[in-house]
Amino acid sequence: MENRMDNAAKSLHVDLGDRSYDIVIGESLIARLGELIAPHTPHGRVAIITDENVNALYGKAVAAALADYETHLIVRPAGEAQKSMAGLNDVLESLFRAGLDRSDMVLALGGGVIGDLAGFAASIYKRGIPFIQIPTTLLAQVDSSVGGKTAINSPFGKNLIGSFYQPQLVIADIDVLSTLAERQIKAGYAEVLKYGLLGDAAFFERLDAGQGAKILALDKPALQDAIAVSCETKARIVAADERESGQRALLNLGHSFAHIFELAAGYDGDLLHGEAVSAGMQMAFEFSAQRGLCEVSDVTRVHDHLAKLSMPMPKDMAPYLNDIDALMGHLSQDKKNERGALTFILTRGIGEAFVQRDVSPESVYEYLENLKDRYA
């Protein structure tokens, strides 16, 4: 993976053979949208899939940047509920009505929900139409827009219906982050922190020494560095394991717990994905320490870092701990599970995550019960 600089924008390359693509990170990229997508849209016809909030903020700027293109705009309501069969069907019907063919392009303009929904629609529309990710949240810029995972949710769990489908390009404009609410910034920071905790202890040290606070304050150099480091790490892991048959599962640190809390919350906006991941990562360290895999001091460092930045923690998941049996039922649907045994991403310390494929349901049940008692 090579790095390049162009007009103060940083470009990273995701090496996947004929499915390779670049990630461009920088300021004022929305204004350059027409120029950036031109190599990928020879026929000049694009469908822009976005949500009401993002369209209100950037719809006019995107339209101006794409004045030389024939565009079809699809605006969805905001929120996780759009990642559903109904939401998918609405998007597909709009693409059909617009008459797009497989030489045209889909632009996913929004956060992780829009990226997942638009990417999955692109992957199945006429057996695949190219798409470009334009992530507008920190979480999407550092994680969900990169790697080609696209999906919608099911009543049985999060992201259970989907495909691996790589974008043609990812455009991460740092300027758009200034419109995000504090909750959204913190949700995105959880995924930044994840990269330090799973495999880059030096990055965690930088975050803990002050870069984390700068990111939450939207310091642009700190943001660009963090987005680049996160994308570099994910790109390297994805290049080695595109379809999650091995080490790519490491990117799910904290996610097994997070996903069951999200399902319990009902995808209604009360609990953001990154908020659940923040708590879930501390839980993964606690669970690892209880199994003798990492030191209690590592758990304390993660706890203290989250507390210092007022990030969501396990205590904040208390409202979703009422029915442990239901949570375990959700956990049984986790995509990583094999032959009845639970698969978790556990850790031997900060920067030392690993895949554990034989976790007993009984041990997880006991941990969740103890957590419930602790915060009752």
Image (cartoon, rainbow, N blue to C red):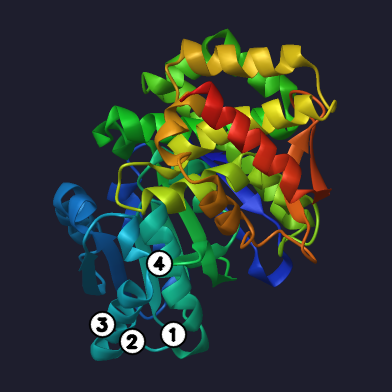
Q: Which residue is mark 3?
A: 94
Q: Is residue 239 above or below residue 174?
A: below
Of residue 345 and residue 176, the one placed in the foreground of this image is 345
Quadrant in the picture for residue 363: top right
Name the residue type under label 1.
Answer: Tyr
Is residue 179 shown above or below 315? Answer: below
The quarter of the displayed image where residue 286 is located: top right
Q: Are marks 1 and 3 in contact (CB under 8 Å)?
A: no
Task: In the rendered structure, find residue 100 and report the number of the disc placed on it.
Answer: 2
Q: Are marks 2 and 1 in contact (CB under 8 Å)?
A: yes
Camera-side residue of 160 and 231: 160
User: Which secondary structure, mark 1?
Assistant: helix
Total marks placed: 4
Q: Residue at x 33, y 81 (%)?
A: 89
Left or right of 358 in this view: 219: left
Marks 4 and 1, how far apart at CA:
12 Å
Mark carried by residue 99: none
Residue type for callout 4:
Leu
> Viewer-nearest of labels 4 and 1?
4
Measure how far apart labels 1 and 3 are at the Cα level. Answer: 11 Å
Residue labelled with disc 1: 125
Q: Position of residue 177 (x, y in %)?
A: 33, 35
Q: Which residue is mark 4?
A: 117
Secondary structure beneath dot 4 equals helix
In the rendered image, is residue 68 in sight? yes
Instruction: Please name which of the two marks, 2 or 4, marks the residue nearer to the observer.
Output: 4
- Compare marks 1 and 3 and give the one earlier in the sequence: 3
- Indicate which label's residue lies in the foreground, 2 or 1: 1
SS for tag 3?
helix
Locate residue 93 relative to residue 128 in the image: left or right: left
Seen at 61% across and 63% down, the residue is 333
